[in-house]
Image: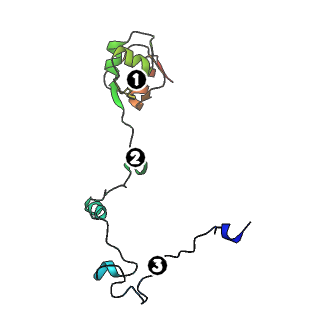
Amino acid sequence: MQSNTLKATTSRMTSMRVGRGGKRGKTSGRGTKGQNARAGHKKRPEIRDTIKKIPKLRGHGKNRSRTVHTVKAYAPVNLAILESVFTDGDTITLAVLKQKGVASSRGGRVTPVKVLGGGALTKKLMLSGLLTSASAKTAIEAAGGSVL
């Protein structure tokens, strides 16, 4: 190993410090006066002014899917519809309602159904996995059916 073959592992160059006399006078290489010449201050990016012009989302929060708990919407089905569509002794589920055309689907999902007490029921029907109102439940049990 010879001294003329040695190489430094780090650079000896330091970053230029401006504004301290010597060969860099007046604007110290910054080229202008005012905001651009001041230490620690820079011009605002133009995109920031555009962002500030966009209105804030007011109300419940910026991300409505996480901040607001929406009430699940149920499609109403009256007892009169069940009376006309189904026969005595049928078991009614959400899939059966979709198959008979009583419940609708959107995007591959069947909308949830709530059975309401509108109309009279004379047939014995078994409901499973469906939401029912209190009047509908009493009318179904009075006709000999059951709600599971």
* Mark 1 residue element: helix
Q: Mark 3 points at which residue?
A: 16
Q: How many labels does the image show?
A: 3
Q: Which amino acid does label 3 sit on?
A: Met
Alpha-carbon distance for marks 1 and 2?
38 Å
Location of residue 94 (image quadrant): top left
Any part of residue 120 in sight? no
Label 1 neighbourhood size at 10 Å, few (<14), some (14-19), many (20+)? many
On the rendered image, what quadrant is the N terminus found in? bottom right
Please state if 50 lies on the left or on the right of 38 as rendered.
left
* Mark 3 residue element: loop
Location of residue 137 (image quadrant): top left
Label 2 neighbourhood size at 10 Å, few (<14), some (14-19), many (20+)? few
Q: In this view, does 128 lie above or below 18?
A: above
Judge by depth and name the residue closer to the eye, 148 or 145. Answer: 148
Q: Which of marks 3 and 2 is nearer the N terminus?
A: 3
Could you tell me if the residues under marks 1 and 3 are in contact, i.e. CB atoms within 8 Å? no
Q: In this view, does 61 lie above or below 31?
A: above
Name the mark on residue 65: 2
The x and y percentages for residue 148 are 51, 24
The x and y percentages for residue 142 are 43, 20
Q: What residue type is labelled 2?
A: Ser
Foreground mark, 1 or 2, reads: 2
Judge by depth and name the residue closer to the eye, 147 or 35. Answer: 35
Which residue shows up at 42% across the image and 82% down it?
18
Label 3 neighbourhood size at 10 Å, few (<14), some (14-19), many (20+)? few
The x and y percentages for residue 144 are 46, 16
Name the mark on residue 139: 1
Q: Which amino acid does label 1 sit on?
A: Ala
Which residue shows up at 31% across the image and 22% down it?
119
Judge by depth and name the residue closer to the eye, 116 or 72. Answer: 72
Q: Earlier in the sequence, mark 1 or mark 2?
A: 2
